């Protein structure tokens, strides 16, 4: 079974009251700490016990929390009063007008309209312009230095790329040379292999591979053989 609903009223038993105060005080401080961390809130908690003992917690500092509370409370009280609200808006309008007048005057001086300025004002304006000019020159030099560094870096990268291209070109030239050696070397080897099949010629001028033509000739008569006489028939 769940816990029964607790009646919210003063606890008469002193011991039970102290135990409940200790437990709930710890839970309340824990919740305040979690609220300040989770929600990025500025939390201030002040607790006085029945024995006038002080317990407090502040996410930043208790002094800043109290000052902020008093300031916001005062502003809220002023806003609740119409007359006070009008005075607040009048003060803000006067402050904005003064700022606008100062900015317009300063812009007029920067544009070269120096009428009505004393020596002190002119010296002050001159110092401001010199400081501004110095800042402009420093910014310009910084931009130029950065651009020079960037260009130098790009030049270095292009130089490295050029070296890589030269290396590739040398490799291509070497490969081309090797291919030429292989091609011409193979051609010379083929010519050397064909050379044994060439026609060999004797010193007397006869070609071994020339076609041989044979002819039948009549036998020559021997010297000892007498010429045959024709037989005479009777």
Image (tube, helix red, strand yellow):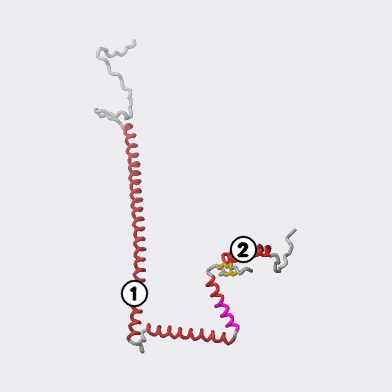
Q: Residue at x 59, y 64 (%)?
A: 34
Quadrant in which the C terminus is drawn:
top left
Q: Which mark is residue 134?
A: 1
Quadrant assignment, res 221: top left
Q: Main secondary structure of the magenta part?
A: helix
Give the left or right position of residue 149, taking residue 48 as reference.
Answer: left
Give the left or right position of residue 110, taking residue 36 as reference.
Answer: left
Question: In the image, residue 148 lies at what x, y percent?
Answer: 34, 65
Question: In the image, residue 62 lies at what x, y percent?
Answer: 54, 70
Element assignment for label 2: helix
Q: Nearer the viewer, residue 35 or 167?
A: 35
Q: Nearer the viewer, residue 41 or 155?
A: 41
Give the left or right position of residue 95, taking residue 217 as reference.
Answer: right
Outermost residue to the top: 234
Would you say residue 48 sits in the magenta stretch? no
Q: Badge 2 is on which residue?
A: 26
Question: In the image, residue 84 lies at what x, y percent?
Answer: 57, 85
Element assignment for label 1: helix
Highlighted magenta segment, given as a residue range: 70-80
């Amino acid at each position: 079974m769940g816990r029964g609903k607790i009646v919210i009223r003063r606890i008469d038993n002193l011991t039970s009251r102290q135990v409940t105060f200790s437990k709930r005080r710890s839970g309340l401080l824990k919740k305040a700490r979690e609220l300040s961390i989770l929600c990025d809130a500025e939390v201030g908690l002040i607790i006085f016990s029945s024995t006038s003992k002080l317990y407090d917690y502040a996410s930043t500092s208790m002094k800043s929390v109290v000052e902020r509370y008093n300031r916001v409370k005062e502003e809220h009280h002023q806003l609740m009063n119409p007359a006070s609200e009008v005075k607040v808006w009048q003060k803000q309008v006067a402050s904005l007008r003064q700022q606008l007048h100062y900015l317009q005057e300063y812009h007029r001086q920067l544009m070269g309209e120096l009428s009505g300025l004393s020596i002190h004002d002119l010296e002050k304006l001159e110092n401001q312009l010199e400081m501004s000019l110095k800042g402009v020159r420093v910014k310009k030099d910084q931009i130029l230095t950065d651009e020079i560094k960037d260009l130098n870096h790009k030049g270095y990268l292009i130089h490295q790329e050029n070296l890589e291209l030269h290396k590739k070109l040398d490799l291509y030239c070497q490969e081309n040379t090797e291919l030429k050696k292989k091609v011409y070397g193979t051609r010379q080897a083929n010519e050397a292999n064909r050379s044994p099949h060439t026609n060999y010629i004797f010193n007397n001028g006869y070609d071994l591979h020339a076609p041989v033509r044979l002819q039948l000739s009549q036998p020559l008569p021997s010297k000892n053989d007498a010429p045959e006489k024709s037989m005479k028939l009777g």
